[in-house]
Image (tube, rainbow, N blue to C red):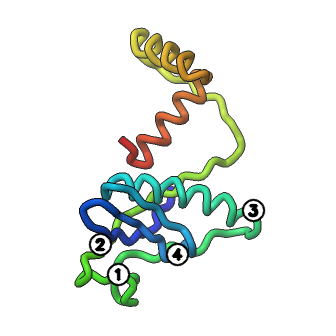
């Protein structure tokens, strides 16, 4: 999994994250966490669109490179945050998992409630956990 550096800025009610190495990609929210989660989703969508027209993603610079390039204005309250990029390969594979029977029953019940298969529910939950959604 790759990480891109996002630049978080904001105030009490409005927060934003822009991702310099993904031009036009940004997220926002009423809290820093909401803005980071929104930027994570936006980066995945941006990357899928980008890869539809190009063979490779732009190289993700590190925090030091962005700081030395003057792209993060710490004096104005900006800070760097890591935004994970988890892309689907489009190739499902079978996995054998061992889970407690009570947990598996709860997973199946919640998947049914949401109209999902067990696999889709587990994939969604794993993606949310990996990307840092709460």
Q: CA distance from mark 4 to mark 3?
A: 17 Å
> Pointer 3 and pointer 2: residues touching (CB < 8 Å)?
no
Query: Callout 2: 10 Å neighbours few (<14), some, many (20+)?
Result: some
Lower position in the chain sequence, tag 3 or tag 2: 3
The residue tagged with tag 2: helix, strand or loop?
strand
* Residue at x 38%, y 47% (from the top left corner): 132
- Across and down, in percent, residue 95 comes to 59, 28
The residue tagged with tag 3: helix, strand or loop?
loop
Query: Callout 1: 10 Å neighbours few (<14), some, many (20+)?
Result: many
* Residue at x 62%, y 62% (from the top left corner): 47
Name the residue that disc number 3 marks.
Answer: 52
> Pointer 1 and pointer 2: residues touching (CB < 8 Å)?
yes
Name the residue that disc number 1 marks.
Answer: 72
* Residue at x 29%, y 72% (from the top left corner): 79
Lower position in the chain sequence, tag 1 or tag 2: 1
- Across and down, in percent, residue 115 comes to 60, 21
Name the residue that disc number 4 marks.
Answer: 21
- Check the image and report above or below for 27 versus 76: above
The residue lying toward the viewer, choosing from 84 and 109, is: 109
């Amino acid at each position: 999994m790759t990480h891109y550096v996002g630049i978080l800025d904001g105030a009490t009610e409005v927060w934003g994250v822009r991702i310099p190495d993904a031009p036009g990609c940004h997220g926002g929210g009423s809290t820093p966490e909401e803005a980071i989660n929104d930027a994570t989703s936006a980066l995945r969508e941006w990357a899928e669109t980008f890869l539809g027209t190009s063979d490779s993603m732009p190289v993700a610079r590190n925090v030091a490179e962005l700081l030395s390039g003057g792209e993060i204005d710490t004096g104005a309250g900006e800070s760097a945050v890591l935004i994970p990029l988890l892309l689907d390969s489009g190739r499902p594979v079978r996995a054998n998992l061992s889970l407690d029977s009570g947990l598996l029953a709860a997973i199946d019940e919640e998947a049914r409630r949401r109209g999902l298969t067990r696999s889709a529910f587990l994939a969604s939950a794993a993606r949310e956990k990996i990307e840092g959604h709460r």
